[in-house]
Amino acid sequence: MVVGSKQAQSAARRVLALSHALGEGIVWCPRKHALYWTDIQSATLWRHFPASGKLQHWKLPERLASFALCEQGDYLLLALASKLAFFHLVDGTLHMLHNIEPDLATRCNDGCCDRQGRFVFGTMHEPVDSPPDQAIGSFWRLNTDLSLERLPLEHVVISNSLAFSPDGCTMYYCDSLTRTIRCCNYGDNLSNARNFVVIRDHAGVPDGSCIDVDGGLWNAQWGAGRVVRYRPDGQLDLSARIPVSQPTCACFGGSALDTLYVTSARQGMNAQMLRRQPQSGDLFALDLGQRGLLKPRFAGISQKNALGNP
């Protein structure tokens, strides 16, 4: 990986003042022309319509770690802290699917759909009274028939950076604490897991990622106040500054998919840090002249499944 990179000429602009503890998982919906994201620690799902400025939110019974839009109607597939569930945006009903790692000190974390419409997500170590430090988390896949399988990848402390190449044949993922984004050959089976990027400047750790039309991977780097683009060969191509130190996740949105939206967090920041970075936890946007790819929708929901017993 090269050390240098181009610096983005466009400055990040604040879209919404939110003061989220842990904003994450942002997704653009072209059907609604809206952004969805979660504030994990407040167990709240958010939706924003940039054209009108309308802002909505839904309180959930557990922390919402990540989610996917569904092919069917007004449903989302949620990765709550301890389980997967369908959520109906119109009436607010939840339909539980699977408990996740009930015997481990973990919770769900990052997740997104592959190009076949299957939901891939990871878990993370979550001890009661100390920082996460045990590699007991895993990566899982919810198939379109609603069966669940653990992917044959190494265990992790904090799963993150899940994304898929434009052709769907490469999966990106990481354990944030290793400062390394990895990738593997992807399909019904996985193979050739390898390092994609090693972050050597120790300024930050890899968090959420998204993919552009040219196969570039955009990664929000917690602690470094930046979103960076890596070429498909792993070369560092561009770095865009965010006016807070803890950006968490990025996605392309807007009618042309040419606006990069970035969530952020204030979790773990003391009063002095917040005075220096008062916009921590807000939502930002960058206009970088690059078009992104939509995150795929979950393809497995059916009317029968969705309207079963909550």
Image: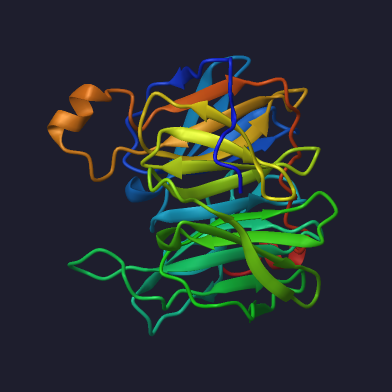
For residue 9, above or below residue 162: above
Horizontal relation, residue 148 to residue 290: left or right = left
Residue shown at 39% from the left, 55% from the top: 63
Q: Nearer the viewer, residue 302 or 184?
A: 184
Pick the quarter of the image with the C terminus: bottom right
- Residue 38 placement (x, y as % from top left): 46, 44
Q: Residue furthest bottom?
A: 103
Horizontal relation, residue 163 to residue 42: left or right = right
Say how the picture is coloured: rainbow
Q: Nearer the viewer, residue 116 or 208?
A: 208
- Residue 249 placement (x, y as % from top left): 52, 42
For residue 310, above or below residue 207: below
Residue shown at 58% from the left, 21% from the top: 8
Residue shown at 28% from the left, 44% from the top: 267
Q: Quadrant of residue 126?
A: bottom left
Residue shown at 73% from the left, 71% from the top: 143
Residue 291 visible at all: yes
Q: Residue furthest left?
A: 271
Q: Quadrant of residue 210?
A: top right
- Residue 287 placement (x, y as % from top left): 63, 18
- Residue 108 placement (x, y as % from top left): 46, 65
Count all numbered tags in the image, as a single digit: 0
Residue 94 visible at all: no
For residue 100, above or below residue 199: below
Q: Nearer the viewer, residue 202 or 303?
A: 202
Q: Residue furthest right?
A: 167
Horizontal relation, residue 249 to residue 124: left or right = right
